[in-house]
Amino acid sequence: MTFRGIDISYANKGIDFRKLKESGISYVIIRTGYRQKTDDMFKSHMENALAAGLNVGAYCYCMSKTTEEARKEAEYAVKLLQPYKLTYPVYYDMEDSTLWELSREKLTEIALTFLETVKSAGYRAGLYSNPSWLETKLDKKKILDSFDLWLAHWTYDPEKYTKYSYGQKMWQWGAESSAGSNGKLDSDLCFVDYPALIDAEEPSEGDKTDFEKGESVLFSGGWHYGASSSTEPTGLPRKAGIAKITNISKDALHPYHLIGESSDVYGWVDKGSVFKKTDGKIKKTAAVVNLRETAGINGKLLTTLPAGVSLVILNQKADKDGITWTKAAYNGLVGYLNSAFIYG
């Protein structure tokens, strides 16, 4: 069974998405933009396609020349997509001539960085590319062993199937005039039921934890990781704040993938770093202060917090000398600190 779809960008305006659906189009792949620039029509296309009941996916046009640029490009695309329910993958469109100067190895690293970043944020990720790039610019096996392919090879006729076979799950065959559009639209055939596949990847009832994917939570601050199984953290410690759970890997070393809302976290974190929004509030240390296992100056030292560090405040209790101690969480550690050293 095949599914008819289109892919669109700023170049496609005035589309009647309801007429598209009535004509037999079942999905739309929408351009997010490139680098940290949003496609002019992204928001309008996304909202109107969803309102018409169409399935949606997205693609980002690759302009990155380093892996760091690719990571930022992916993070920016993910933030744009957060408000929407995607039922098709997020693709990296690699075809721009400005990238030809880069080696095959470098281009492959760039592709994998983008795709792995998108995947770690909870989305199904895929590569959009053509036979020339797959044969000369990319290590296709290294990419396609882990990620889906959307093949671009125009035969100008959906009945004249491409001669190239890379295990592609979607094929862009050309462009055609469609109901609901003033001009021709890039046209695609998909050979798998992505909405069903993506739905099956959602946590089942038996796999659910105390938190839900998509839930806003309190992050207690500290390290985050590039993968749920990583042993080395990424970058510097991130500040405490509100974040959204974008993926859950039950029983993993770092089971929750967070994207910060008021925090700057973007990665996988420890279970002890995540709390219900109703369980506490974010405050800061007023000075250097010790976080102890139990309330009181004799409690076992867990860590020393610098001044100005944000953390999750849970509750308070007084010791036998009348000193108030605050139960707080930071970087997966939960302990007590003198309440006099907290503000906010």
Image (spheres, rainbow, N blue to C red):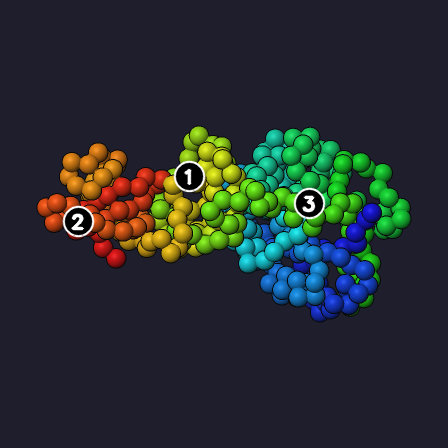
Q: Is mark 3 on a helix, strand or loop?
A: helix
Coordinates of residue 289 in the picture (x, y in percent): 20, 43
Q: What element carries label 1?
A: loop
Nearer to us in this view, 74 or 170: 170
Q: Residue 270 carries which label?
A: 1
Q: Is residue 2 left or right of residue 295?
A: right
| Location of residue 273 with respect to 214 vertically, above or below | above
- Residue indicated by mark 3: 197
Crowd rating for badge 1 (residues with CA inside 10 Å; few <14, some 14–19, many 20+): many
The residue sitting at 33% across, 53% down in the picture is 280
In 3D space, how far apart are the residues under numbered discs 1 and 3 (Cα atoms)?
A: 28 Å
Instruction: Report whether residue 39 is seen.
Output: yes
- Residue indicated by mark 2: 318
Residue type at the position of mark 2: Ala
Kindly indicate the quadrant of the structure image that contains residue 22. bottom right
Residue type at the position of mark 1: Asp
Coordinates of residue 239 in the picture (x, y in percent): 35, 47
Q: In this view, does 177 lie to the left or right of 342?
A: right
